[in-house]
Image (tube, rainbow, N blue to C red):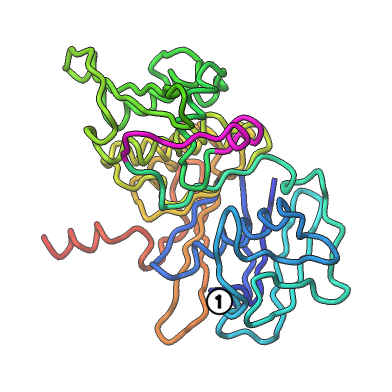
Amino acid sequence: MITSIALRNFKAFREIVLPLRKLTLLSGINGSGKSTVLQSLCALKQSFNAGCLSPSGGLLLNGEFVDLGVGKDVLCELSDSNEIAICIVEDESRENWLFSYAERDDLLQFAEGSLSNFNTGGWLARGFCFLGADRIAPAVVYPKSFNETVRRRSLGIRGQFTAYFLAVHQDEPVSEHRMHTAGFSSRLIDQVNAWLGEISPGVSVTAEEIGGADLTQLLYRYGGSAGIDSSNHYRPTNVGFGLTYVLPVVVACLAARDGDLVLLENPEAHLHPRGQTAMGDLVSRTANDGVQVIVESHSDHLLNGIRLAAKRRIIPAVDVQLHFCMRRDGVRSAELVSPSMDDDARLTDWPDGFFDEWERALLELT
């Protein structure tokens, strides 16, 4: 498990150290640096996958996970040098990555003498899932890739291979620690439908390959607790946007393997508050079951779902890390506040702007 990440002169941060735990929630004002943390990990991972983390390589800025541009796009505005540093601490090992700045280059070379002997059996070599905020929308068909879905167990950064993943892996068992409490079987497809039922009661989804084409389709059906007795199947374009948008997140959490790292941007977007709270429960169960999860979110409902999970002992409070990114007036570099949580899910600190807009509006209304 990655226990901390330190950034120097990288995008929003001149210098920052972020402790990470089994479940880490990044929140904050827009443009305050939340995405920077996820992007640093993605840039390292895509560099590793491309074979660039070698003496003749460096940090690949544009690749399968993120497109960061060129050197001038990633050097912090308040940089005190022409070097960008990323330090990852994983258990007992430390990886120090130091890259030389080049304004127009999209592959930042290693600074002289800085290449560390990274742990090839560490996080870089294990399962990695990044789902960005720009995820799949309702569509008639979705692409499939045997290499991405079967060999690499990838959903794609937009979740574009989720339908094919479900079609291929639907009978895989889900860990009992991540199973929904509604009493469904442990099959992946059944657990996906159980969790989707928190968003839209009675819904179920199926994924089918289209014969003779490199395409897959999703079909939704309602029945049972939804109060609609129907055998009709509906295209994603004819049901709520949020169901398809959140589907990759649900599949990623349920299908991740022990030791994997899962990064999620706004997993709760387009969901009803009840569904957002349920997502907090699901990511908590996943993080307490051997998968490290880092979430970027603006949702107080998702935060409360995590707090409820801690209070219910679904995940120990000590295994949850909260970070609030902010920029003070006139300060161009991002800052960090990190409230901690006790066993009753009470927070030690509630900084200004940290999921407090509901209370602000309520005070003015009353």
Residue 110: x %, y % from top left? 79, 71
Residue 207: x %, y % from top left? 41, 24
Point out the image quarter for the N terminus.
top right
Q: Residue at x 39, y 67 (%)?
A: 29
Quarter-wise, where is residue 105 in the image? bottom right
* Residue 173 to residue 135: above or below: above
Q: Is residue 53 left or right of residue 201?
A: right
Point out the image quarter for the C terminus.
bottom left
Q: Is residue 255 left or right of residue 271?
A: right
Quarter-wise, where is residue 216 in the image? top left
Q: Name the residue nearer the viewer: 310 or 286.
A: 286
Element at badge 1?
Answer: helix
Q: Residue at x 55, y 59 (%)?
A: 66
- Badge 1 crowding class, 10 Å Cα cut-off, few under 14, some 14 to 19, many 20 or more, is some
Q: Residue at x 39, y 40 (%)?
A: 305
The residue at which mark 1 appears reads as 73
* Residue 292 to residue 312: above or below: below
Residue placed furthest toward the left: 366
Residue 92: x %, y % from top left? 81, 50
Give the extent of the magenta segment. Answer: 138-154
Q: Is residue 225 left or right of residue 72?
A: left
The reply to whether the magenta stretch includes residue 32 is: no
Q: Residue at x 43, y 18 (%)?
A: 190
Q: Name the residue nearer the viewer: 133 or 93.
A: 133
